[in-house]
Amino acid sequence: MAKGILGLDIGSHSIKIMELKEGKGGVWKLSKFGLHKLPAEAIVDGAIMNSAAVVEGIRDLVARHKIKAREVTTCVSGHSVIIKKITLPSMSDDELSESIQWEAEQYIPFSVNDVNLDTQVLSRGDDAGQMDVLLVAAKKDVIQEYIAVITEAGLKPLIVDVASFAIENSYDLNDDGEASEVVALVNVGASLVNINVLNNGLTAFTRDINMGGNQFTEEIQKQLNVSYEEAEALKLGGNISTSQSTTEAVVPQEVGAILRSTSESMAVEIQRSIDFYLATAAGLTLSKVVLSGGTAKVTALKDALESTLGTKVEVIDPFRKISFNPKEFDPDYLKDLAPVSSVVVGLATRRLGDKPA
């Protein structure tokens, strides 16, 4: 059994690092966990814009948490990643590997020479001699950016996953629901919304939307004339100093109104993506939405999604089935960071040679 593989989530707001040890009965135990905030626009749409800040952040986490493991699983997301469910004539895995380069050309907007390709067979050999395949393409230059900063920080990249699949791994680890349900995993990060719709426990549809928690912060900044840091605090229900003349007029009702209107706009965009999938899958209805990401802590977003989609929405708890020593990890700290930890938990459970769920 492989040991000491780190999950490393390099997000647009922060870097998360985690080490999980697999115990008896498949129970995971939290060994290392840390978070390092990044400066604004260090990561934009999944692309690394400030590599020095990312390298420094990774090194800080490794040193601060006395991490000895060096092998890493990380992930990419954004418009450099294309995920499509395609139908092909039934064939063996070897035949699929040989033909996918040619098949992929008609499904991705990039040259196949500029991407790394991977596939996952979802169903094989129907009556018409067809099989469903999940095709994943990620731009080589973006992957190389992530590999470069990880290597420069002194770690060894072992696996490069996709953020949507990492969240799916985290969800599968902790969920007790029916596999036959149609579940939308919605991860709202600082600048991207990752949507992964599962049908019968398998990925049926994915989409990344250029929206995120930054929109809430920017609207609060603009409408209430406060700093970025103050707007971040207000977004998550915190208080700010009223000693400055610019912030004296801020009242909870004003913040609430901004959060509700921004949440409603985001909920409509998420609904459009999910409705697009449901329109192509006759007879299916959405069972629930599982919300993750830092913006999942904005109560107005959960409420807006429930109202817009007409279904229950729950905030993910990726630590629910992970054991930890409360003397080493504060339970309240883990609870507070649970929504932003779904990606890194999913990455930390990956091992070389396995496939995403």
Image (spheres, rainbow, N blue to C red):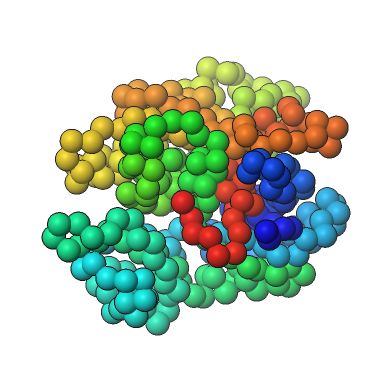
Q: Position of residue 50 (x, y in %)?
A: 65, 65
Q: Position of residue 37 (x, y in %)?
A: 70, 49
Q: Position of residue 325 (x, y in %)?
A: 80, 34
**Residue 70 vertical placement versus 97 (above, below):** above
Answer whether residue 231 is visible to the viewer in this image: no
Residue pictured at 17% horizontal, 40% vertical: 282
Looking at this view, is 75 or 351 the one in front? 351
Residue pictured at 46% horizontal, 51% vertical: 357
Residue at the left extreme of this rendering: 128
**Residue 320 vertical placement versus 96 (above, below):** above
Residue pictured at 19% horizontal, 46% vertical: 280
Number of labelled discs?
0
Looking at this view, is 354 or 86 the one in front? 354
Residue at the front extreme of this rendering: 25
Residue 268 falls left or right of residue 222: left
Q: Position of residue 20 (x, y in %)?
A: 70, 48
Answer whether residue 73 is visible to the viewer in this image: yes
Residue 49 falls left or right of residue 17: left
**Residue 102 vertical placement versus 15 (above, below):** below
Q: Quadrant of residue 242?
A: top right
Residue pictured at 62% horizontal, 34% vertical: 321
Q: Quadrant of residue 288?
A: top left
Residue 243 falls left or right of residue 148: right
